[in-house]
């Protein structure tokens, strides 16, 4: 059988093959690259520059002493879990709510919206 891509004759074990091994590898790599490139454009580092900028400002502010990382979660008051910063608005990069990783993941899942609103407005 002849390869549909390059025309080279090849033997096949599977009747559904239309390409020689070399062309099949090239097609597979091109497909993987296309999917990776599309994924990276949608989810890559440059996806949300405001978010990256806000995160770096918080990191520098904590290191410089302008902002203090809380030791307890503002939502559940837990001190035993890792505490993470959550931005409600990236246009206000130093307005951060400090949450444990469990509450942070729940907020991103859509829970605690009313309570988070109260925390960002300064009402406890």
Image (cartoon, helix red, strand yellow):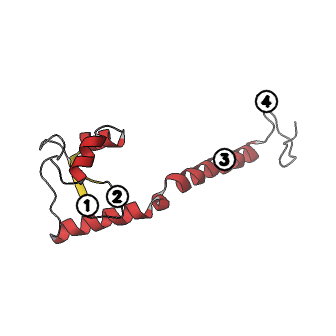
Identify the residue at horizontal 22%, vertical 47% (top origin).
118
Say the numbered circle drawn on residue 122: none
Instruction: Please report contact status of discs 3 and 1: CB closer than 8 Å, yes or no.
Output: no
Instruction: Tell me the mark number nearer the camera, choosing from 3 and 2.
Output: 2
Separation (CA) of disc 3 from disc 1: 43 Å
**Residue that carries the numbered disc 1 in the rendered image:** 95
At which x and y percent is residue 77?
13, 42
Q: Does the rendering let one see residue 7?
A: yes
Q: Does the rendering let one see residue 101?
A: no
User: Which mark sits nearer the N-terminus, 4 or 2?
Assistant: 4
Q: Secondary structure at mark 3?
A: helix
- Which sits in the foreground, 116 or 35? 116
Instruction: Please report contact status of discs 2 and 1: CB closer than 8 Å, yes or no.
Output: yes
**Residue that carries the numbered disc 3 in the rendered image:** 31
Separation (CA) of disc 4 from disc 2: 53 Å
Say the numbered circle drawn on residue 16: 4
At which x and y percent is residue 80?
13, 42
User: Which mark sits nearer the N-terminus, 3 or 1?
Assistant: 3
Rendered image quadrant of residue 65: bottom left
Instruction: Please report contact status of discs 1 and 4: CB closer than 8 Å, yes or no.
Output: no
* For residue 49, side relative to residue 8 (left or right): left
Separation (CA) of disc 3 from disc 2: 37 Å
* For residue 61, side relative to residue 36 (left or right): left
Q: Residues within 10 Å of mark 2 (few under 14, many from 20)?
A: some
**Residue that carries the numbered disc 2 in the rendered image:** 89
User: Which mark sits nearer the N-terminus, 4 or 3?
Assistant: 4
């Amino acid at each position: 059988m002849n390869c549909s891509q390059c025309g080279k004759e090849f033997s096949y074990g599977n009747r559904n093959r239309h390409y020689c091994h070399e062309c099949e590898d090239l097609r597979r790599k091109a497909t993987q690259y296309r999917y990776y490139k599309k994924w990276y454009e949608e989810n890559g580092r440059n996806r949300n520059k405001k978010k990256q900028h806000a995160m770096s400002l918080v990191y520098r502010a904590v290191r410089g002493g302008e902002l203090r990382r809380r030791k307890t979660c503002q939502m559940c008051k837990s001190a035993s879990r890792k505490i993470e910063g959550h931005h409600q608005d990236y246009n206000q990069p130093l307005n951060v709510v400090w949450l444990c990783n469990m509450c942070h993941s729940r907020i991103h899942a859509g829970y605690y919206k009313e309570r988070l609103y109260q925390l960002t407005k300064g009402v406890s």
